[in-house]
Image: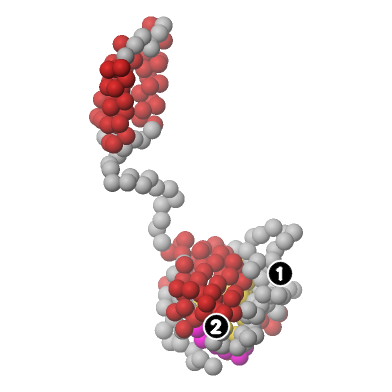
Amino acid sequence: MRALSSDLGASPLIVLTRPQMGENIGAAARAMLNFGLEHMRLVAPRDGWPNPAAVAMASGASPVLDHAGVFPDVGAAVADCDYVYATTARGRGLVKPVLTPEAAMVEARAMIAAGKTVAVLFGPERAGLENEDIAHANAIVTIPVNPGFYSLNLAQGVLLLAYEWMRGTTQVPGARLELAGTDMASAIEIEKLGDHFEEKLDASGFFFPPEKAPGMKLNLRNMLSRWAMTRSEVQTLHGILRQLARRG
């Protein structure tokens, strides 16, 4: 059995309790590394360790498996941890705080920042964690899923917790515009495009009847500013207007 590591890094430990299939261990490793988690511990894996099926499924995440600790029971696996979360869809009659993955990872970040070691327990694929496992935990994490079908694949559960961990530790904008090598058009460039549109549309008799022309021009300017165009797009529209005028 691997000894407890003193270099746990600044992220939660993922503890897979009595995992049954090597493929699920490998998939869990991939989910972990996708979202910046590197420390895995295994409690009594059914098919022994190391497991070729786990390595094959892990693909590029094999370093997670290479450094995975293997322990005989949950108590040994979390002996050096300051706080432990148990993932389960049912409270199992034990009195413990129940958190969502998001809330749990917010807590975990604060504890890890304070120098604490945090672990997240996942149960075997068939039946999940037993009361004896959950008794080692300080709190329960329940993933909000369809109450009529709450069975999650082991790697899916790991991925959801890992995603919530990374979501709170990286500053990623909720939306962004890929500019593809160009810049956003300036206000004066949009204004000049509006002048060009008005000139060509005036010449074609578009602003009719005359009493509606001011409102139509205002709508045009508002539309152009709302589009948030790039300089390349503004130049394209200028070119279209010039070509249409020549053909007219």
Q: Quadrant of the C terminus?
A: top left
- Magenta residues span 68-73
Q: Position of residue 228 (x, y in %)?
A: 36, 35
State the residue at coordinates (42%, 72%). Answer: 113
Q: Quadrant of residue 187?
A: top left
Of labels 2 and 1, earlier in sequence is 2
- The kind of residue on which mark 2 rests is Pro
Classify 10 Å Cα crowding around label 1: few (below 14), some (14-19), many (20 and above): some
State the residue at coordinates (51%, 75%). Answer: 58
Q: Quadrant of residue 209?
A: top left
- Which residue has dot 2 on it? 52
Q: Quadrant of residue 179?
A: top left
What kind of element bears circle 2? helix
Q: Work out whether residue 104 can be spotted.
A: no
- Which residue has dot 1 on it? 90
CA gap, disc 2 and disc 1: 33 Å
